Amino acid sequence: MKKFPPLPKWTIVAPIAAWLLLAGTQFDFGAMYTLLLIIGLLGGVLAAVYHAEVVAHRVGEPYGTLVLALAVTLIEVALIVSLMLAGGTETMGLARDTVFAAIMIILNGIVGICLLAGASRHKEQTFGLLGVSASLATLAAIAVLTLVLPNYTSSAAGPFYSSSQLAFIAVISLVLYGTFVLVQTVRHRDYFLPDESTNDEDIHASPPSAKVAWVSGGLLIVCLGAVVLLAKSLAPTLELAVANAGLPKTLVGIIIAAVVLLPEGLAAVRAARANRLQTSLNLALGSALASIGLTIPAVAIVSLTTGLTLSLGLDIKSTVLLVLSFIVATLSLGTGRTTVMQGTIHLVIFAVYLFTTIVP
């Protein structure tokens, strides 16, 4: 059995450097310092990926994918809430845009790349149908209830829920996500367990020691804190750049979601290339579920306690793309086998989503 390697030095240096760069934002170092902040942010994200995978390897599947999904969602929730509190009424649609972007990035972008990369290398891949079906059903229910239904309720005009409706939907989201986690980790854990690849050395490496796992867990928290605060400090620059380029404001939500989901995406693609498609889909769909299932309740609490209006309903174009994504995902992941065809379809839908966001 392959011995688990020691922690690379860069995974320890990256979060420290990110915090030092963050401290430097108190001074005016000019535009070039923004580039250093971006590098520090990406370094923190990559280090977070590594440490989350170390912890995941220690606790095993499917708990490992749950660790990374919750870690990524923590970044997203903290970032959205901080921007909402800082931006006031101007950010009332930020949560909707970011959550919708996360679903589209995961369901079409990440899943598409994983299916294409895995099938390109292994021709055809298989996965457990029961776990993926449960994930898609839960994700579809939460997404429609939070992002589509507000457009058709009458208690509040427009794409808004009334206070009581918002509180109810927040509870429903937590119930659905909580039930999914129970099924994934306790009641039907075997639905989400992968068939381990016989030629993947990483799978058969001995798990890290408890000491290494605890160190990685601590460094993961350090990385996440740095990523959240660096992203927050870069947000005004991002919003200004998007506005100056004459691009739609919704692009800000897409960029935030892309940065937040980078750890999950890299881990999922690595798993797919290693012929571990079950783990790859667990990571991707689990992250989408955590993203919407935990983010919506969090921003709902902020909205109800601060009085900030929360716009949740999608427009017609976005609703069509969301429904199309779920239909295609249900069909392409409905046989337990995938090829390059399914990956290409998902990536085409993702390209349409990006193009129609920039050119509405």
Image (cartoon, rainbow, N blue to C red):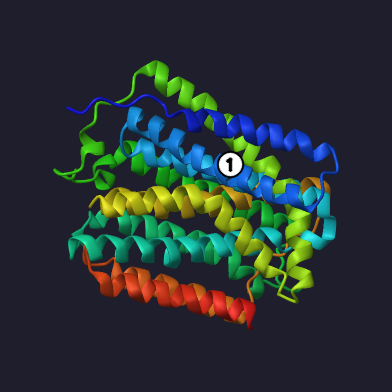
Front residue of 360 and 25: 25
Give the amino acid type for the residue marked by disc 1 in the picture: Leu
Q: Is residue 341 visible?
A: yes
Q: Position of residue 171 (x, y in %)?
A: 59, 48
Residue 250, located in which quarter of the rendered image? bottom right
Q: Quadrant of the N terminus?
A: top left
Q: Quadrant of the C terminus?
A: bottom right
Q: Residue at x 60, y 44 (%)?
A: 75
Q: Residue at x 51, y 47 (%)?
A: 175
Direction from residue 299 to residue 309 in the image, left or right: right
Using a 10 Å C-alpha cutoff, classify the residue at mark 1 as few (fewer than 14 neighbours), some (14 to 19) or many (20 or more): some
Q: Residue at x 21, y 38 (%)?
A: 201
Most distant residue in the bottom direction: 360
Q: Is residue 312 visible?
A: no
* Count of numbered marks: 1
Direction from residue 270 to residue 233 in the image, left or right: right
Most distant residue in the left direction: 198
Residue 3, located in which quarter of the rendered image? top left
Q: Position of residue 196 (x, y in %)?
A: 19, 43
Question: Badge 1 is on which residue?
Answer: 74
Helix, strand or loop at label 1? It is: helix
Q: Is residue 46 above or below residue 1?
A: below
Direction from residue 122 to residue 60 in the image, left or right: right
Q: Position of residue 183 (x, y in %)?
A: 35, 43
Q: Position of residue 106 (x, y in %)?
A: 46, 60
Front residue of 162 and 93: 93
Q: Residue at x 41, y 26 (%)?
A: 7
